[in-house]
Image: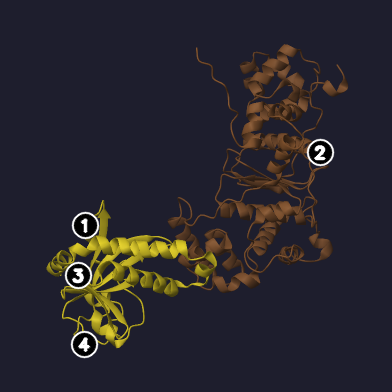
Amino acid sequence: MSADQRFNPDMLRLARDARKLTQAELAQASGVTQALVSKLEHGLITEPSDEVVTALSTILKFPPAFFRQQDRAVGFPHLHYRRRAKMGAKELARIEAIINIRRQHLLKLLRSYEQPVEKPIPQMDLDAVGTTPEKVAERMRAYWLLPRGPVDNLVELVERAGGIIISTNFDSALLDGMSFRSEGLPPLFFMNNAMPGDRFRFSLAHELGHMVLHTVPDDDAQMEDQAHRFAAEFLMPAADIRPYLKDAKISAFARIKKFWKVSIKALIKRAYDLKMITDHQYKMLCIQYNKAFKAGEPGDVPLETPTRLKAAVRYHLEHLGYTISDLAKLLCFREEDVSRVYIGRPLLQLVGSS
Amino acid sequence: MEEDLLRCMELISPLLVSLHDEWRGAHQLYQQRYPADILAEHDESTAASCVRAHMLMAVMRRFDGTDGCHVLDINGLKVLNYRDLAVFRFKKVDAAGRHQNYQTEQQKDFDGQLPLPNLPAAVRLTSGYQLDISGQAIERIIIARPLGTSIMWTAQVNVIEDQASWIDITPRRLAGTERFDYRGRAGGRR
């Protein structure tokens, strides 16, 4: 067997994490021993039989070719998560595995699809430049020639700057988004689309803050604070939003939500950060907010939809003559998964009648 | 008070479904048809004025000149006269049925159930709506009978399958505290 067809332990680990199975569970379901699974994952057995690969492939729902890809799984620094603290390690491993797999897909898809980028997402070191996240956000708005007031469509803006936004349902409400730069790829933003449009926008702006401000890991709390401040200033510039925050009432914040396309909660926090309300007012507003909006805020902000990844897939199908089957082979993904994940519709199956 | 509430609500019962629906329609029109940037520039008072303006137009379209209903404009005080039996003002109100604007002498007289030129000697009522905490949805439709700066009674109007019903939501008073119940009594004219 040639080197580029060797069984790749990383891929087995990714597939198992993606399906949230332990080694023991995988072994039991696929009818192989846990010892074999363990040795495969540690690279102690490099050439399993076709029967073993087929058994694993069936349970893990990846084609056999998936396990013979020679890519390496990358680890994600925790600085680029926007997640809730209660997310468990196993759940995080599942999401990281899915993101790794999608990253590999992107590497392949973007090899043949290019889109010109006029003003890419820059990187700025706060310490070196001697400035604040708010000032950076202000400069970014000027750099992208944004008019005063709310950002109309943040997804479109990030995509125009070359970012790839993968809007996906993580099957978990505990992770809002994740972003990173990976060799050979533009900045990637994996965003959970199972959340309201206003929260999606703020999370994306937060991730954009990480992409601009944080090239090397630093103190976690400090980086989160900086990304938050960047996002707040980017979406709600102090100079523009102040007149809208004068009335410290939940109903007033709800009225401006639709215009600024941020949550009522973000507006309350912004009013507090800009010292437009006192500590006591902030506390009372938070109490009122928690009491009133247990089931979610009123006034939906539409979820913004990324287009760049879809365009890359469409380019393969319409211009490069790929079929779904070809794409499945290219991505080492099952055809039904290609259809579901990248085409946005389930693959039609012929059902025979007896 | 209870007899007055029963008598008045019985009197105006033919109007309840319409008043209920028109308030909701006016509020919906304001929420859905105004652009977001315009809404963002409104304060509560402006929002209430807009909703009230749409309500008045809707009331005129639906009632004016029919079934003994007439919209009257008495020196800027726009009211709905129902068969010379009840006269309504239209206001955004709180849970007790009180409205909060600064009042002209004429409006004070209206709320005080006092005679006004060109206005029939009818029961003076407030037809109003109370918003939820977000200000984005109507919590309840209310009919209240003002008495100066205070309220004699308050009723919540409910409509289910085009049938109106009402419940008494007059704030209850603890014995001996009546004189503290009414906002602004000390500074009021009466």
Question: Would residue A12 appear left or right of A240 to someone viewing this image?
Answer: right
Q: Locate residue A232: give its quadrant.
A: bottom right
Q: Are marks 4 and 3 on the same chain?
A: yes
Q: CA distance from mark 3 to mark 1?
A: 29 Å
Question: Would residue B110 appear left or right of A193 to someone viewing this image?
Answer: left
From this viewpoint, is residue A24 visible? yes
Question: Would residue B14 appear left or right of A39 to someone viewing this image?
Answer: left
Q: Which mark is residue B175?
A: 3
- Mark 1 sits on what residue? B165
- Mark 2 sits on what residue? A111
Mark 3, secondary structure of its residue: loop
Residue type at tag 4? Pro
Q: CA distance from mark 2 to mark 1?
A: 68 Å
Q: Locate residue B77: give its quadrant.
A: bottom left
- Mark 4 sits on what residue? B117
Q: Are marks 3 and 1 in contact (CB under 8 Å)?
A: no
Front residue (pair A66, A176): A66
Q: Are marks 3 and 1 on the same chain?
A: yes
Front residue (pair A277, A155): A155
| Chain (yellow) | B
Mark 1, secondary structure of its residue: strand
Residue type at tag 3? Ala
- Number of numbered discs on residues: 4
Of circles 2 and 3, which is in front? 2
Q: CA distance from mark 2 to mark 3?
A: 81 Å
Earlier along the polypeptide chain: callout 4 or callout 3? 4
Crowd class of label 1 (few under 14; some 14 to 19; many from 20; radius 10 Å): some
Q: CA distance from mark 4 to mark 3?
A: 38 Å
Crowd class of label 3 (few under 14; some 14 to 19; many from 20; radius 10 Å): few
Mark 2, secondary structure of its residue: loop
Please say if B90 is above or below A76: below
